[in-house]
Image: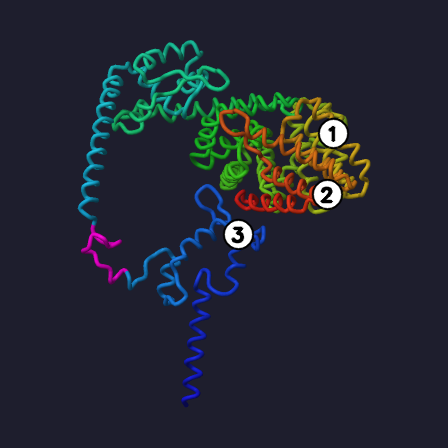
Amino acid sequence: QQQQQQQQEEFSVAGEAILAELESPRGGDDAAAFFDPIALPEEADLRFLGSGYTSVKDAIATEQEGSENSTSNTPSSQRRALHQGRPPLAATNSSNTTTATDDFGVVSAAAEEEDLGLTAVISSELQTLDSELEAVRRAFSMLSDVARHALLCLSVLPKCFNVSGATAVCGQASDEECLQLLEPLFSANFVFTCRTLALETRLELTAKAKLFLSTEPGVCDGKEIASLRPVAEERFVAHFIDVLERLNTINVCKLGWVREQAMQRFDQERASLDRLFELASRGPSATMWRRLMRALVAAPLVLRFCVTARTRVKYCELALDALQQCDPALLEASLAPADTVRIARLEMALGEAYLDLLSLRKAEQPINRALVVYEPVLTAIEAGENMEDIILVADSVLALLLSANLHLIRQDIDEAYVILVRALKILTGAQLGKTTLAVNTLANLVSINVCRGQLQKAQDLSTRVLEVLASMKYDTMPIYADVLGITAIVDLQLNQPVKAEMSFRAALVIVNSWGSKKWFDIPVQHCLDLDLWLLKGLARSLANQGKLVDSQQLLDRAKRDWLPRGL
């Protein structure tokens, strides 16, 4: 019996040790290996925090900081509390709340004096603010009804705006009439002028005017005034959809400077365009989907370069989900041919966004659904029919190229080759041979040549593609860096690592300089892994030259940046 009791005690001690090891966030001999971020797989889970992603490495670092106070002999009930960021129950219950030095106790006399001083400062600031708002109230009360209505309409516009935007939301016939309408607002210091980096004179509500409109009760009282804001918001949506549609020209695919100019224009209106998608996504599903769809397909190519992939996924799915909720009979009766094409373009925009996030499975279905709608257009072009809508032709070919990308990723080389050759023939027949669509087609053919071992053919073709891009003035843009990287891959296959290193470095310079342009905001790099792919290629070229330490440093850097981007 004594031996049996001794074995039970030993088992109990051993069991408690195992339990402690399992419960402790860093217990056991394998703790160092477990918390080493290098040992984690690249596809490790991400924790979603608000609107951004944090990597497992960052989450582990947080847990390590929180677990430094834990000890191996802490009872399991207390370890769990510490691990969850709370004090142990025993410590909480036995805390002395009467001493000024206790962490859970009352505030000391010195701290109370500091609080009184802070309260006085806050009270003084609030009094100053109230007196300033009182001056704004008096100025607002002296405005005419027409000027007040104009100010309430302008409150729909975020940040700075141009005169045409003010003209639209105020419902004026011309910019001259709008400026006359706004003259009292300038005199009363509700509106001021500002200059942008493009040296364009723009307007903005003053900070006090914004605060007054957002906090003053009763400023929107009355049926007539209360109805002004929804009307102004509808005008806002219509105006900025029109702004986007004017950016949607085929020259964005033909000339680098036109694309950059379109992106700068988008960036200049970024706050208003962000507001556009927010407003367009409101309301009942029966009307919301059409309005939001129009906003998303007004200039989809520019949106791809200027709006993050996750934001595009969010709004595209929102519009398509609202469309699914509509009554099928009513929907079919209300759909126009233009709506069918727009829905296909919306599906393709969703597929593009998923491809940019490397979510390949999610990208496949929307791209295939879009291709079904565009197939008759492609067949008509192949039959020799003259298509006047050149944007429709470009979108149809883009659907083909996205389908070819999916086949390439799955290593369906022969199927991808057939699709790419078909796309190239259609582009040539539609006089779109000198566009970025053709460049993307040729770049994929280079990759296919590499897969088939036709290295010299791949090198010759990649050189020609770079020359075409340079002649189209794209040689300072990410698309040129992408093709440079493909050229470098060919050089690696040809056992020319020094030449490959030069191409990878030149490509990285382009990507980095593109992100540091003095725009209103940093341009969005739609391809989230482009610079990381170039870094890994550069690391490989260095390794082939025997520079293993430098190569490993670059690989570590690429791996470190991979997870925080949600890839």
Viewer-side residue, 305 vs 143:
305
Task: Single out the mark in the foreground, 2 or 3.
Answer: 2
Farthest-out residue, bottom: 1
Callout 3: few (<14), some (14-19), or many (20+) C-alpha neighbours within 10 Å? few
- The percent coordinates of residue 299 (x first, y second) are 57, 27
Residue that label 3 marks: 45
SS class, disc 3: loop
Residue that label 1 marks: 465
- Asked if the stretch drawn in magenta spans residue 218, the answer is no
Magenta region: 92-106
135 sits left or right of 531 in the view = left
Image point 47% across, 31% down: which residue? 277
Please state, as top left, top right, bottom left or bottom right, where the N terminus lies in the image.
Answer: bottom left
- The percent coordinates of residue 135 (x first, y second) are 23, 20
- The percent coordinates of residue 304 (x first, y second) are 57, 32
- Asked if the stretch drawn in magenta spans residue 100, the answer is yes
Q: Which mark is residue 545?
A: 2
- Type of the residue with mark 3: Asp
Residue 353 placement: quadrant: top right
- The answer to whether residue 471 is above or below residue 375 is above
- The answer to whether residue 172 is above or below residue 335 is above
Viewer-side residue, 102 vs 355:
102
SS class, disc 1: helix
Specify which label sits upstream in the sequence, 3 or 1: 3
